[in-house]
Amino acid sequence: MNRGLAACRSELIARMDADDICHPQRLVRQFNHFRTHPETTLLSCRIRHFPRSEMRGGFLAYESWQNGLISHDEIVRNFYIESPFAHPSVMFRYRAVEKLGGYRQRGWAEDYDLWLRLVQNGAKFAKLPETLLFWRDRPDRLSRTGKDYSLDSFRRCKLNFLLNDYLRGVKSVTLWGAGQEGKMWRQLLVDNSIKVERWIEVDRRKIGQTIHQAPVVGVEQLMPQQGKMLITIGARGARTEVRNFAAARHLTEGVDFVCVT
């Protein structure tokens, strides 16, 4: 991909994979968006997986989640959940990516790594509401088989960027979600010298317990400006409920908490 970038002479770069299908109007519609929205750094579009007969719940849920993120603000606040873009659906400004050194290999997904570097450098994102990229799924797809695309690799990638942003200089955090995902994040944080000082739980049966020397407390304990908190609840419906509850408690996303999975 970097060799391809080096050969490009256009201000705008469109990504595409050979086995996917591009809507005939995709490139012109994305080009026209950049022409009328000069502030945009990277633009995607809605996508649809195929063949549909082989789709399972996880990929269909991911498709629905991605397609629900249209505005810059929606995209940015969900960056630490999953990649908000299908790589072959994007068009971006060449100079913005060149300035960051292009793609790089760090032991995790190279496209997600690039998106996170862009957002931390003030990039502006957008997504066209039309479905203009048809994303082929197959058993040997790299995102299914590659080590750089494992759940552990994605967590390490997210923490790497969190340490330079939301968790910069932080020594302890609160984790909301004491399930398997929360415990995986707890170990990763401890490995990077960040202590989990408490767990937040809605299950009354768990409140009062201690997990890895940290107390489990109820959501009524939450107040603004109590330190950094990571919400590790993976279920998409539950995440919406948690965000609504946090807002009702006057907690600010990006300040008092960040959603991760």
Image (cartoon, grey):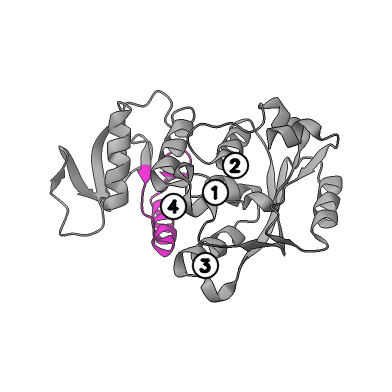
| Circle 4: residue type | Ala
Q: Mark 4 to mark 1: distance in Å?
A: 24 Å
Residue 140 appears at what percent x and percent y?
Answer: 52, 57
Name the residue tied to disc 4: 247
From the viewer's perspective, is 28 left or right of 187?
right
Looking at the picture, tell me which residue is in the foreground, 21 or 169.
21
Q: Which residues are magenta?
A: 230-258
Residue at 63% over, 33% down: 103
Q: Mark 2 to mark 3: distance in Å?
A: 21 Å
Q: Mark 3 to mark 4: distance in Å?
A: 28 Å
Residue 167 appears at what percent x and percent y?
Answer: 42, 30
Q: Mark 2 to mark 4: distance in Å?
A: 31 Å
Quadrant location of the N terminus in the rendered image: top right
Viewer-side label of 4, 1: 1
Confirm or deny contact between disc 2 and disc 1 (CB under 8 A). yes
Q: Residues within 10 Å of mark 3 (few under 14, many from 20)?
A: some
Name the mark on residue 83. Answer: 1
Task: Determine the image quadrant of residue 46.
Answer: bottom right
Callout 1: helix, strand or loop? loop
Name the residue tied to disc 3: 60
| Circle 1: residue type | Ser
Q: Residues within 10 Å of mark 1 (few under 14, many from 20)?
A: some
Name the residue tied to disc 2: 111
Q: Is residue 252 magenta?
A: yes
Asked whether residue 171 appears in the rendered view, the answer is yes
Confirm or deny contact between disc 2 and disc 4 (CB under 8 A). no
Residue at 43% over, 41% down: 153
Q: Mark 2 to mark 1: distance in Å?
A: 9 Å
| Circle 2: residue type | Asp
Asked whether residue 257 appears in the rendered view, the answer is no
Confirm or deny contact between disc 2 and disc 3 (CB under 8 A). no
